[in-house]
């Protein structure tokens, strides 16, 4: 049986590598066909993307974007591990960023006090907004998909109402943009000046810490085990003494708290204010990245880097005469190919495992029968 286990583990490793490779090849083929359909040369497009994507300024851009995308992916993945679809990450992070920006603009405390307060405020806001969906789920059985989508719309309306001159916002010096009161320089998060390549956001290190915490809590603690158990089977979890409703509510709180961090790289490292052009849609990007990364912290990181790379290089292709819709096509094709490839590989791996176990058991039964005959 040890040999059988080793053989299955090796196959599982190979299949785990084969899935993303298969998805990548399929995505490249489909994307090449789409580019050909527009009358362009896909080889030249891929070459241009590769050369532009490895430039030093592109590397800094990709890392900065990946910081935000990684936090979004982790926030979504926490819900996924519980079999919860937190579609409301977008509303949670935008409302959290807005409230944190208002607080940060009003604070006069030193940076070492103000920055943690801003971050905690964002996490608390995201957690409380997600808690509404969690409460409705455990008390009234309301689908979190429906409630979080509605909460996205409500959050957008609240921000639109409060982000007006005379309420919690003001016009900029040019009188064209509505924004919250800017954060004082003491509240700026540290950045790393890389010279001509640009400025690397220091919040990257916070994202790394979040990833490590996500891996440790879900993979090395009793809480993480209970959370994954509830996600796989609520009945089995309840039979083992796990409070299913409590875990659902707690997971939504944690997912919302991480969602509150999504806007912090932009707020603390870049814009230092919340305006009507603050990034939107990142929560939905996080869903795609969590799917790409299979809810694994390293996989999510690779997905976030890939998303940043595609955004950087396809925007450049637009200036080279390619259609601007290529980015959306590539992203959609990659997600679709990844989902299909992982499902195909999963089914193939399950079939192979069943065949090997059956063959091993048959061999053992034959050996036992032979010994009995000899005796």
Image (cartoon, rainbow, N blue to C red):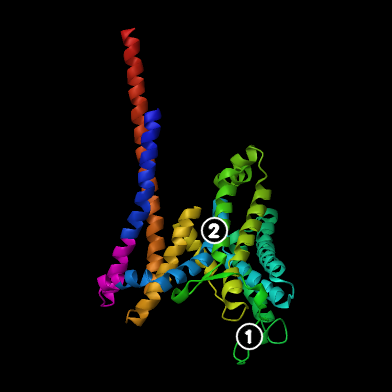
What residue sits right under mark 2 in the picture? 208
Sequence-wise, the earlier of marks 2 and 1 is 1
Q: Nearer the viewer, residue 241 or 221?
A: 221
Identify the residue at the far bottom of this view.
Answer: 174
Residues 258 and 235: in front is 258
Q: Residue at x 36, y 74 (%)?
A: 326
Residue 82 as seen in the image, left or right of residue 131: left
Label 1 sits on a secondary structure element that is strand
Q: Would you call the spot at circle 1 few (<14 residues within 10 Å), some (14-19), or many (20 or more)?
A: some
Residue 163's quadrant in the figure? Answer: bottom right
* Magenta-drawn segment: 26-47
Res 232 quadrant in image:
top right
**Comparing labels 2 and 1, the label whose residue is closer to the camera:** 2
Q: Position of residue 329 (x, y in %)?
A: 38, 70
Residue 241 on image: x %, y %: 67, 39
User: Viewed as shown, does residue 109 lie left or right of 311?
Assistant: right
Residue 104: percent from the left, percent from the top? 69, 74
The residue labelled by disc 1 is 178
Q: Is residue 154 visible?
A: no
User: Residue at the spot x=41%, y=68% of the render?
Assistant: 309
């Amino acid at each position: 049986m040890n040999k059988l286990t080793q053989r299955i583990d090796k196959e599982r490793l190979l299949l785990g590598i084969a899935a993303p490779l298969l998805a990548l090849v399929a995505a490249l083929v489909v994307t090449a066909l789409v580019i050909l359909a527009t009358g362009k040369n896909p080889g030249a497009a891929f070459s241009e993307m590769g050369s532009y994507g490895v430039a030093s300024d592109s590397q800094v851009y990709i890392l900065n974007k990946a910081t935000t995308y990684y936090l979004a992916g982790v926030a979504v993945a926490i819900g996924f591990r519980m079999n919860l679809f937190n579609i409301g990450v977008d509303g949670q992070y935008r409302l959290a960023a807005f409230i944190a920006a208002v607080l940060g603009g009003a604070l006069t405390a030193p940076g070492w006090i103000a920055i943690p307060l801003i971050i905690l405020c964002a996490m608390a806001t995201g957690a409380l907004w997600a808690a509404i969906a969690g409460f409705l789920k455990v008390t009234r059985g309301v689908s979190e998909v429906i409630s979080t989508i509605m909460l996205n719309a409500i959050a957008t309306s609240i921000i639109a109402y409060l982000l007006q001159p005379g309420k919690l916002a003001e016009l900029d010096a040019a009188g064209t943009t509505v924004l919250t009161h800017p954060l004082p320089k003491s509240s700026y998060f540290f950045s790393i000046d890389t010279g001509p390549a640009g400025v690397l956001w220091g919040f990257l290190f916070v994202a790394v810490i979040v990833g490590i915490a996500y891996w440790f809590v879900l993979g090395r603690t009793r809480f993480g085990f209970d959370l994954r158990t509830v996600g796989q089977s609520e009945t089995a979890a309840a039979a083992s003494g796990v409070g299913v409703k409590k875990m659902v509510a707690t997971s939504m709180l944690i997912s919302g708290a991480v969602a509150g961090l999504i806007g912090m790289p932009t707020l603390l490292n870049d814009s230092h204010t919340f305006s009507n052009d603050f990034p939107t849609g990142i929560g939905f990007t996080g869903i795609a990245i969590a799917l790409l990364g299979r809810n694994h912290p390293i996989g999510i990181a690779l997905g976030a880097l890939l998303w940043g790379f595609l955004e950087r290089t396809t925007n450049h292709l637009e200036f080279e005469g390619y259609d601007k819709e290529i980015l959306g096509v590539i992203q959609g094709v990659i997600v679709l190919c990844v989902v299909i490839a992982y499902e195909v590989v999963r089914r193939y791996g399950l079939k192979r495992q069943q065949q090997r176990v059956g063959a091993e058991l048959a061999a053992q039964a034959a050996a036992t029968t032979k010994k009995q005959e000899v005796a």
